[in-house]
Image: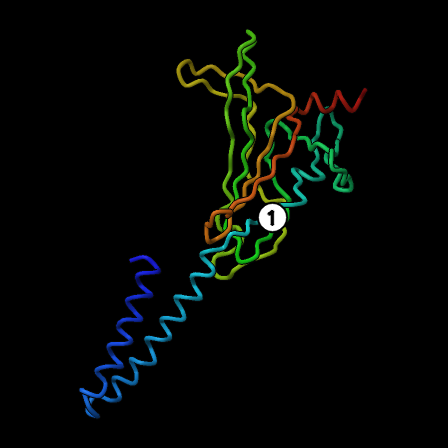
């Protein structure tokens, strides 16, 4: 039974109870009194709940950073990447092949946040013949905001998401193929608890995907 029909049913039952109260008499007066209190309470509860489920304000994602202040060790040298002090809008964070990807971001909603998903789209294998195959890595941040309370505004810091492998393994041939380095898009999608028409927001960030050796050589130039 949908919300509108349920409200109409409660209202009709309420009117019937009032009409028949005089016929029943004092014997069941206490029972009728209790019902007359409970029914309106259920009515107003259903009305207030409907406001939440009609939420049309989407959540907001901001201050997205990947692998902030990350470090790699190569050729006995420690290199720091993705300086957290760099807040320029056109910055591009660097992800390292073979390392964990972690997220720092702010999530906001007018009622309650639900979870989020991060996807690294179209990661290409380097087949060496001019033909590349696309893969998608993704990780879910379900219930990351907590299950017992409604969280409206929070900052997630260095939340571990996924590990970018060094190689793809082809199912048919068991051949290992290295991932192609370069620029990719990382998408963050966040939802609210009520799943309304505008229940999701997404942000797409450009990232660079490099091996430790490539980063070392770039820094040495």
Q: Is residue 139 above or below residue 40?
A: above
Residue pictured at 30% horizontal, 69% vertical: 10
Badge 1 density bin: few <14, some 14–19, many ≥20, Cα 10 Å: many
Q: Where does label 1 land, which residue?
A: 60
- Give the residue at the far top of this rendering: 129
In this image, 39 relative to 167: left or right?
left
Q: Residue 27's image quarter?
A: bottom left
Image height of 8 relative to 197, above or below: below
Residue 122 lies, with reference to residue 152, above or below; the image says above
Residue 26 spot, x, y in % from top left:
21, 92
| Disc 1 element | strand
Corner quadrant of residue 105: top right
Residue drawn at (46%, 56%) of the image: 54
Whole-percent x, y for residue 86 in the image: 77, 39
- Camera-nearest residue between 143 and 43: 43
Residue 54, compared with residue 190, is above or below; it is below
List x then y, in percent, for residue 56. 51, 52
> In this rendering, would 139 be left or right of 49?
right
- Indicate the position of residue 82 as horizontal and vertical percent values: 72, 35
């Amino acid at each position: 039974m949908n919300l509108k029909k349920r409200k109409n049913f409660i209202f009709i039952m309420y009117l019937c109870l009032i009409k028949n109260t005089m016929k029943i008499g004092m014997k069941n007066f206490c029972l009728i009194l209790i019902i007359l209190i409970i029914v309106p309470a259920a009515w107003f509860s259903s009305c207030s709940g409907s406001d939440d489920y009609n939420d049309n304000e989407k959540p907001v994602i901001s201050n997205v950073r990947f692998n902030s202040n990350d470090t790699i060790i190569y050729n006995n040298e420690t290199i720091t990447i993705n300086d957290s002090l760099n807040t320029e809008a056109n910055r591009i964070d660097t992800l390292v092949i073979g390392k964990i990807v972690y997220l720092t971001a702010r999530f906001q909603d007018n009622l309650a946040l639900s979870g989020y998903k991060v996807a690294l789209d179209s990661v290409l294998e380097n087949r060496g013949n001019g033909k590349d195959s696309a893969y998608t890595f993704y990780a879910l941040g379900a219930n990351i905001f907590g299950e017992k309370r409604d969280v409206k505004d929070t900052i997630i810091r260095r939340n571990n998401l996924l590990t970018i492998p060094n190689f793809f393994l082809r199912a048919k041939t068991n051949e290992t193929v290295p991932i192609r380095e370069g620029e990719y898009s990382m998408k963050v999608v966040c939802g609210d608890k009520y799943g309304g028409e505008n229940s999701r927001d997404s942000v797409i960030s450009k990232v660079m995907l490099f091996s430790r050796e490539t980063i070392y050589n770039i820094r040495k130039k």
